[in-house]
Image: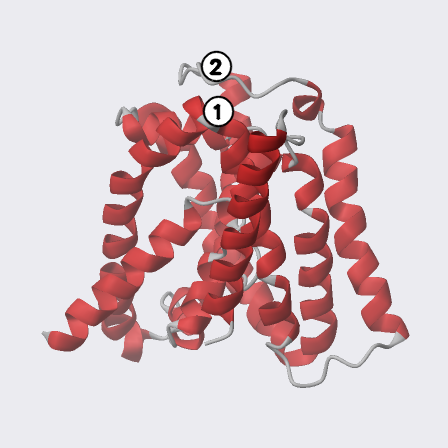
Amino acid sequence: MREGIKLLLKGGVIGIANIIPGVSGGTMAVVLGIYQKLIEAIGNFLTRKEKRKEYVIFLGVVFFGAGISILAFSWLMDYLLTYYEQYTYLFFIGLILGSVPSIYKTHPDMKLSPPAILTFCGGVLLILIIFFFSPVHHAPIKSDVGVSIDSRQAIMLIISGIFSGGSMIMPGISGSFILVLLGQYQIVIRAVKNINLIPLFFLGIGVGFGVWSFAKIIDILLKRFPKETFYFILGLVVASVIPIFPGIPAGLAGKLTALVIFIMAALISYKLGDR
């Protein structure tokens, strides 16, 4: 029972991380000591019948804890994005940049090499391509975005869910950041807050497939090309501040407040990753 409660709380922490753009649920799983088992359970619960019950119980407790925290904190995120959008995104950027050292130290051999540089640049380039060729970045984020969807929006939610779900289990990659990048974050937060099941259903289809398929891919890549994989992750994280940068607040008081928020967020993220 005690271990079950601890696992439930760990799932809750991972859930909170996954609704904050810039904080990686995968990184939190590493910090909390359950990442390897999480990847193993997700990637093998369909194929390893002798351990299926153990995997299902483990994943059920983790996901239940994550679900509770997501429901609880979605209200807070919706409020902050509605009334303090600029400061909120500066906090997110601090979290993103503060996580870079911990990602770099995840693998013992991070010595620079041509393949490492290439994969790092590949991660940066991927973010820039998505950002500059996506139509959503040209429009301002609206606090009154609704949750009514058409067929195009449903497809976008599924696609976003696939990449968001996959990134949720990657150390250093924020699943909610992917939703921000693809213009779906506020739609999803508002849907969770209002318990609007239609957008969440389409998102869930994508997330389920993304989590399972990416777990398989990550397991292979981390075993065969660990250094290059982590440099690719670093490239994604460093470039991820570009799409969500909200500008500098006006006035001296606004600038000082923004600086304090940024530094505080960076320190929080760094300390969590440095444990």
Kind of element beneath mark 2: loop
Query: Mark 1: which amino acid?
Result: Ala
Q: Position of residue 191 (x, y in %)?
A: 35, 26
In the rendered image, the vertical position of residue 17 relative to residue 180, given as above or below: below
Quarter of the image for the C terminus: give it: bottom left
Q: Which mark is residue 139?
A: none
In the rendering, at what x and y percent does residue 26 appear?
48, 62
Residue type at the position of mark 2: Asp
Q: Residue furthest left?
A: 1
Q: Which image quarter is the N terminus in?
A: bottom left
The residue where tag 1 is placed is 154
Q: Which residue: 81% across, 71% down?
A: 116
Tell me the crowding category of disc 1: few under 14, some 14 to 19, or many 20 or more residues within 10 angstroms, Cα based.
some
Q: Is residue 9 left or right of residue 44?
A: left
Judged from the image, the secondary structure of the residue bearing numbered disc 1 is helix
**Picture quadrant of residue 223:** bottom right
Q: Residue at x 56, y 35 (%)?
A: 180
Q: Is residue 17 left or right of residue 109?
A: left
Q: Is 98 or 114 nearer to us in this picture? A: 98
Is residue 163 visible to us here? Answer: no
Q: Which residue is mark 2?
A: 150
What residue sits 66% from the left and 54% below the top?
237
User: Above or below — where is 92 with respect to 28?
Assistant: above
- Can residue 85 be seen here? The reply is yes
**Vertical placement of residue 43 versus 204, above or below:** below
Spatial CA distance of label 1 from label 2 is 6 Å
User: Residue placed at 59% from the left, 46% from the top?
Assistant: 93
Q: Are marks 1 and 2 in contact (CB under 8 Å)?
A: yes
Horizontally, residue 221 falls left or right of residue 213, namely right
The 10 Å Cα crowd at callout 2, few under 14, some 14 to 19, many 20 or more, is few
For the residue pair 123 and 40, the one nearer the viewer reads as 123
Residue 11 x, y percent position in the rendering: 30, 60
